Image (spheres, grey):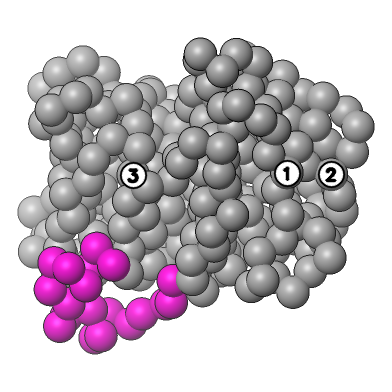
Amino acid sequence: MTAETRYASSPAEVLSWNTAQTRKELLIEQLFIQDEIKLVYSHYDRFVTGGIFPVTRALALTPPDQFKAAYFLERRELGIINVGGPGMVKVDGETFEIGFKEALYIGKGRKELLFSSKDAAAPAKFYLNSTPAHHEYPNRLVTRKDAEIVTLGAMETANHRTINKLLVSTVLPTCQLQMGMTELKPGSVWNTMPAHTHDRRMEVYFYFEVPQGQSVCHFWGQPQETRHIWMQNEQAVISPPWSIHSGAGTSNYTFIWGMAGENLDYGDMDVCAIPDLK
Ligand SMILES: O=C(O)C(=O)C[C@H](O)C(=O)CO
Ligand SMILES: [Zn+2]
């Protein structure tokens, strides 16, 4: 297992960042390494982003040094979305089968977490987000049929997309984690436009289904002082609570969003008028 630490930064500090430093601080370039677990521990809301890619053997999720915990979920909760072939997660002896684009919530206090693929020729890719937790909520598999689904935008403004709210308070109880998946319609390229901030919560975006040879330009920064990061398929980016998080692809694509912070109100964002962005 590798577990990197990323620090929090202020709007004033990031004004001096060049491209390399921006990428070092915010971009998570590789999450899926065969038969390995990769974690990134952010000081924003103690949010962990990770990738588990079991191909030839099952992988056990154990706590990184940063937690100083006896087991991963001692004081945390966990959300997983499978972006690969069919897989299994064994939680204290109970096995959950997770298909492509299905989510699993695992509550605080569970000790054994074992990840495997059904077929090494089509391995599962478990994308995970984890946040500190104070209460034990039930484990639950969440598929598209359980999700709260909203379609936003329009073809004419190139932002027509479906937001699948998977691990959110209207679907199941969590302490502070919220996760979902947004799918852009063919011909649409803009996500989260109009852009927004939510100073109460940080957010991480994980882009996937970006076709070969295409990329996503992710926008971040304060609305009056924006920056960009070019991102490739299966990369993630940390969005500070004070930052917009929006992207334009050279094609359509899908992304997973995960948040943690002050509250569980998905809709409380502060929307930025498009002509005001700088
Ligand atoms: O396309 C969108 O718009 C989103 O998916 C927005 C995210 O869900 C988000 O930023 C929630 O705060
Ligand atoms: Zn947001």
The image shows residue 105, relative to residue 225, as above or below, that is: above
Element under label 2? loop
Residue found at x 38% / y 59%: 238
Residue found at x 77% / y 24%: 96
Which residues lie in the magenta part?
6-24
Which residue is under mark 3? 235
Residue 12 highlighted magenta (yes or no): yes
Does label 1 point to a residue whose CB lies under 8 Å from ligand 1? no
- Looking at the rendering, in which quadrant would you find the C terminus? bottom left
Residue found at x 66% / y 30%: 57
Mark 2 touches mark 1? (CB < 8 Å): yes
Mark 1 touches mark 3? (CB < 8 Å): no
Q: Residue furthest front?
A: 56
Which residue is under mark 2? 112
Element under label 1? strand
Q: Nearer the viewer, residue 117 or 182?
A: 117
Q: Amino acid at mark 3?
A: Gln
Q: Quadrant of the rendered structure where residue 117 is?
A: top right
The Cα atoms of the two marked residues, 2 and 1, are separated by: 8 Å
Residue 7 % position (x, y) = 43, 77
The disc at residue 40 is: none
Q: Residue furthest bottom?
A: 12
